[in-house]
Image: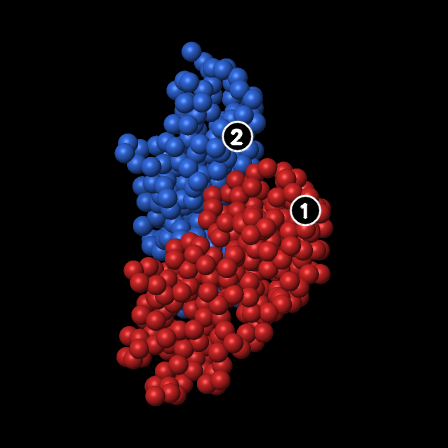
Chain colours: A red, B blue
Amino acid sequence: MEKKYNYKLKLSYIGKNFSGWQKQPNRRTVQGVLEEKLSIFFNEEIKVIGSGRTDAGVHALGQVANFKTNSFKNSEKIYRYLNATLPRDVAVLSVQHVPLSFHARFSAKGKTYIYRIYTKPDPFLFGYGWYISKKLNIKSMLSALDLIKKEKDLISLSKKGEYIREDVEIREVYLRYDGSIIEIEITASHFLRYMVRKIVGHIVQIGLGSLSIEEFENIIKAKDPSKGLFIAPPEGLFLKEVYY
Amino acid sequence: MEKKYNYKLKLSYIGKNFSGWQKQPNRRTVQGVLEEKLSIFFNEEIKVIGSGRTDAGVHALGQVANFKTNSFKNSEKIYRYLNATLPRDVAVLSVQHVPLSFHARFSAKGKTYIYRIYTKPDPFLFGYGWYISKKLNIKSMLSALDLIKKEKDLISLSKKGEYIREDVEIREVYLRYDGSIIEIEITASHFLRYMVRKIVGHIVQIGLGSLSIEEFENIIKAKDPSKGLFIAPPEGLFLKEVYY
């Protein structure tokens, strides 16, 4: 039987505490934790659909999900119930009653991810960024990022063996540096698995002087995930926003 | 025998992981962790003096300490050794060779503390702020803070039974609110124990409408620590800077 109501959730969670988004037996996952609480609240089995999986360790500032139900409940009540009962490392930022056609993954028009690197010891950023104490050449990193903007086929910077839906349209790429923290922000139509972590993994090698921009260009042109070897650790990655 | 060299440290640490600053048997304290590593590095017993104790759970963004040694070591080497060997929840921001007369506590001319309240669920702030979901009247909180600026004897807002050195000179009080996070920043000649937490504890009661500004004024005028009942939790408090 088709369920009758559809809700959209906006979520924030600390990725390092979860084995990723997707439900798996005997693992603590964000989807698992949400479905457990929602099934109790609605007194029916609830399946939560995310805008995409975040890998183990990847954080979310604005993940979006939806779920369908047989009974109608006030959005504000769902919001309050979830925030009162969910563990402290996941929070619901908003709950919205939406048309049945809304699908967190298929309706998504784009996403923004942020990757954070910190270059000075900071206990408050441990687990929330990639600590690199060696000197980075920010200028070369910026030039390398320019390559990303122009190229649509970024399969070399994706996980080997993953299905690729289509060309990626990179809409915006920023690098901010305040002398201590580097933030790379990428907005695209969608993201291949490991894409941001591989982009950052490679531009960091360029910043360290271990990889040249020409070598990086050749890796991209090879269109072969096994050529893109450098993967930044998950704890620096934040899913910032999903657009509909 | 008088030691010959004196070093100044600037430190950051996650307070909730420690039983405060001051060394105690069988407790994990910041002073204890630092003395352990420094005694190994210098191969002599090192005693670290903090600008002041931070209580259990209180964070530091810029705590200052000093220690004396018999042998001279390069500051940069001390910095690198400490950051390589200290646990990840404490970081050394700088090491400086200073005159023997420098004393982290007695030479301090002032300090800045920040207290953070967050009003929307945020897993990244859990343990790094006081979560208050009820509506707060920011305007009344600001008016209450004005009282603090004018008053030198804040003994009602200190811990009962603690020795009071002298009048406190409050230099600056700010409240910042971005619609989600409230930060109260106080700069003073020195701070009585529990002072910031009691100031915040009371202005929050005022913001909630459970205490009037007149009642608060009477509490201050009573000059009695047993009258100041409201203490904000330690996890919202950050020692930001110490001035010399």
For the question of whether residue B216 can be seen, the reply is: no
For the question of whether residue B33 can be seen, the reply is: yes
- Residue A201 location in percent, x, y? 57, 49
Q: Nearer the viewer, mark 2 or mark 1?
A: 1
Q: Residues within 10 Å of mark 2 (few under 14, many from 20)?
A: few
Q: Which mark is residue B80?
A: 2
- Residue A244 location in percent, x, y? 56, 76
Q: Is residue B68 above or below residue A237?
A: above
Residue at x 59% of width, y 69% of height: A166
- The image quadrant of residue A57 is bottom left
- Judged from the image, the secondary structure of the residue bearing numbered disc 2 is helix
Residue at x 28% of width, y 32% of height: B25
Locate residue B33 relative to residue A143 in the image: left or right. Answer: left
Residue at x 33% of width, y 59% of height: A27
Amino acid type at mark 1? Glu
- Residue A98 location in percent, x, y? 47, 83
Determine which residue is flagged by label 1: A215
